[in-house]
Image (tube, helix red, strand yellow):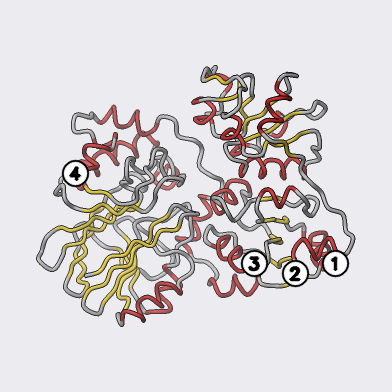
Amino acid sequence: MQIEQIYTGCLAQGAYYISSNGEAAIIDPLREIEPYIERAKRDGVRIKYIFETHFHADFVSGHIDLAKATGATIVYGPNANPSYDVHVARDGEIFQLGAIRIKVLHTPGHTMESTCYLLIDENGKDHSLFSGDTLFIGDVGRPDLAQKAASMTQEQLAATLFHSLRNKVMTLADDVVVYPAHGAGSACGKNMSKETVSTIGEQKTQNYALRSDMTEAEFVKEVTDGLLPPPGYFGMNVMMNKTGYDSISEVMKRGMQALSPEAFEAAANETGALMLDTRNAQIFSEGFVPNSINIGLDGQFAPWVGAMIPDVKQQLLIITEGGKEEETIKRLARVGYDHVIGYLDGGIAAWMATGKAVDTVKRITADEFAEQFKAEPIIIDVRRPGEFAAEHVEGAKSIPLDFINEDMAQFPKDAPFIIHCQGGYRSMIAASILKSRGYDNFIEVVGGYGAIAKTGVPKTDYVCPSTLRK
């Protein structure tokens, strides 16, 4: 028996490859399927099953393409109703995979079809639990995403999750290994650990939601408290996972269209496509195509694309570092952004060589910020509310990047201001959006609050609750 966690940091997502005696199963595969197919070929095994823990909201699964390519059976738990051929399993159903077995544990609450898969080894012993978004390391799945589909409130879903955990998960032996679908950085939970593997026993002692003395009412209150609104693209990803999507090969072919600077500019003007620049924040700040938006590949690229571009059907034109075009299109497709129509051939260097206009973002160091702080400037912190509440520059205003499209009017139009995040990645996203909306009266801090905290600038952890976005 072999188990491999295939973890993708950009999405904080774990897919799983399991093999035994010539047969393999994939759990929650990503959109690009070649790695799974190549791995099976290398091991000389046949992919027999594709197990889906639920209809994912934060990424588009590769289950449909993988099933077509391999003949494997797609398996969902009870209550699933996709528009394509699958095996909808019953609670407790067992699937044979080589010398091991996979048992279905229906665990509704995150969504109503949410299901964990219990691996029973060659000796008949419960070995590991593939817990999807039901149980994370240090947290549990948020119960607010399936309210509309289930015709339930988030409190009712949370109560359902409470019983799923107590009746199906916490009854397992302490040495059963826990393999979740996500880790820290995913928007599918709120307090996930950076660890991506644990045991049932460890989670019983370390996970706030699995306290043995916890009442249902306490669980509901703690699990629903402090939930931020989900990213706008979540609903569309669920729909794509339920009803189907274009094959990844079609998406790649459509996007890999090299456009000269002239053709790129014409395409932007004629189609209304959004120009997405995926270069590093510092490089972007030094020169970029006017009105392009920066979301760097070197950060949590896909989730921030989803948060900043609410319509997955938005046509996109991309600008990347040399050789990063294919990677960019693939990572966009992972979260359902399938409508890249081309890329700037030769990148920003080719654009500048034609003499076309470029824009820049003015940046200052943390030490320069400390000097300017003496003049009491307007300071805008674009980190998340929890980060701001923990500690922030004295007098700073909180406008989280997550809500910048809704809160654009809060940025001053006539007075100069300074923006920062924690390290510079998010504040450059904010800066590019501000620039595209006509703002030119701001500067951005290199290194963000991480650098500012090392200076003598006064800081505070006092927050008036009414000033923070919930």
Tell me the mark number nearer the camera, choosing from 3 and 1. Answer: 3
* Residue at image location 77% in from the left, 70% down from the top: 259
325 relative to 466, above or below:
below
* Residue at image location 62% in from the left, 41% down from the top: 424
Image mark for residue 90: none
> Element at badge 2?
loop
Tell me the mark number nearer the camera, choosing from 1 and 2. Answer: 2
Amino acid type shown at disc 4: Gly
- Cα–Cα span, label 3 and label 1: 18 Å
In primary-sequence order, the first of circles 4 and 2 is 4
Provide residue 135's location: percent of width, then percent of height. 30, 46
In primary-sequence order, the first of circles 1 and 2 is 1
Tell me whether the residue at label 3 lies in contact with that at label 2, contact meaning CB atoms closer than 8 angstroms: no
Closer to the camera, 262 or 321?
321
Q: Name the residue that disc number 3 marks.
A: 325
- Cα–Cα span, label 4 and label 3: 44 Å
Left or right, residue 286 beside residue 174 = right
Q: Quadrant of residue 356?
A: bottom right
Provide residue 143's location: percent of width, then percent of height. 38, 40
Closer to the camera, 108 or 320?
320
> Element at badge 3?
helix
The quarter of the rendered structure image containing the N terminus is bottom left
Q: Name the residue that disc number 1 marks.
A: 262
Image mark for residue 345: 2
In primary-sequence order, the first of circles 3 and 1 is 1
Closer to the camera, 64 or 201?
201
Amino acid type shown at disc 1: Glu
